[in-house]
Image (cartoon, rainbow, N blue to C red):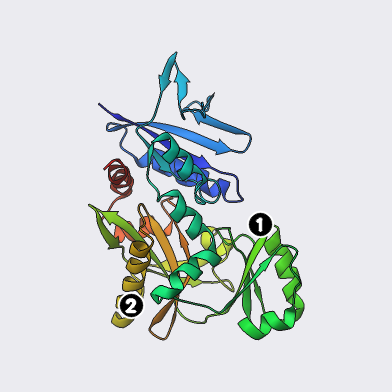
Amino acid sequence: MKKNIAIIMGGYSSEYKISLKSGNVVYNYLNKEKFNLYRIHIFKNKWVYVDDADIETPIDRNDFSILKDGNSITFDCVFNAIHGSPGEDGLMQAYFELLGIKHTTCNFYQAALTFNKRDLLSVLKPYGIKAAPSYYLNLGDTINEIEIIDKVKLPCFVKANKSGSSYGITKVYKSSELKGAIETAYKEDDEIIIEGFLEGTEVSVGVLKLKGITTVLPITEIVTENDFFDYEAKYEGKSQEITPARINPIQLKNVTIAAKKIYDVLKMTGFSRSEFIFIGDEPFLLEMNTTPGLTTASILPQQAKEAGIELSMLFEHAITEALS
């Protein structure tokens, strides 16, 4: 009997349009001979099943079911394609775990931790994972520009702590630009992380479980035309994403070890994609994503293709792992 698979997409953050693209790619590539697929749009004002005619059916949030042709349909597994809240910050994971529904991403604690850049870096520091010097601010805190710059130096990055796709991020070159950058970040989140600029080769590393074994995919080098890997660079063709990355064997070994260590230390499941910058041969962690982009042009699918894994198999594998 075919399994019922809900593909959740959308979300509550600025990333919802990207999530809808990812979700529809999953829907189009998964084998409909093997699975009954249901596109589920999750928004603040509605949770709905959307059929191929774009007719919407409300979700019963009591058990995450839909009523179709007089029959109640429940789901064997949820494929999570929501970037940002509530799919990447642990809210949906906690909900599904309470209901006993399998899903393709990590558990709620790991999702919440990795979505919080400050907490993630703090947890990983005792395990030898290197990161840029940083300074934290919460909305309402006094902004001491001298103290900030003394710690992180210039240039620096001002980032929303819980945000993705480079929303709310500014590269600051002069102290006079700092307050404006902080205001921009506060539009996305009430917590901020200010990090020192690291100059070196940037890479993106995809990790997943293959038959229960932590597997690092071929690594992607990021070469941006812009000042940094911002929204335009990520989604509007203003960058080169070179897979496999043009890094030396020592760098390859070090970043592979670091990415695998992070995945295992955090007891991760599902997909992850982590960004690093090399200082010499040493990788410094920038952030980790647990629901990375899944369009045909996204980094993780590019890495899977380099490893000989087609999109249909990548997505099917995620469901198989979740159900097992």
Residue 307 visible in image: no
Residue 189 visible in image: yes
Q: Disc 1 residue type?
A: Glu
Mark 2 residue crowding within 10 angstroms, few (<14) / some (14–19) / many (20+): some
Q: Disc 2 residue type?
A: Asn
Name the residue tied to disc 2: 254
First reached walking from the N terminus: tag 2 or tag 1: 1
For image coordinates 61% across by 81% down, the residue present is: 152
Is 200 above or below relative to 228?
below
Q: Nearer the viewer, residue 177 or 133?
A: 133
Is 64 above or below relative to 177?
above
Separation of residues labelled 2 and 1 (CA atoms): 33 Å
Numbered tag placed on residue 148 in the rendering: none
Question: What is the secondary structure assignment of the residue under circle 1?
Answer: loop
- Residue 215 appears left or right of 86: left
Name the residue tied to disc 1: 188
For image coordinates 40% across by 48% down, the residue present is: 105
The reply to whether the C-beta atoms of the residues labelled 2 and 1 are less than 8 Å apart is no
Horizontal and vertical percent for residue 130?
Answer: 45, 77
Residue 164 falls in image quadrant: bottom right
- Residue at the left extreme? 211
Horizontal and vertical percent for residue 285?
Answer: 46, 72
Horizontal and vertical percent for residue 261?
Answer: 34, 68
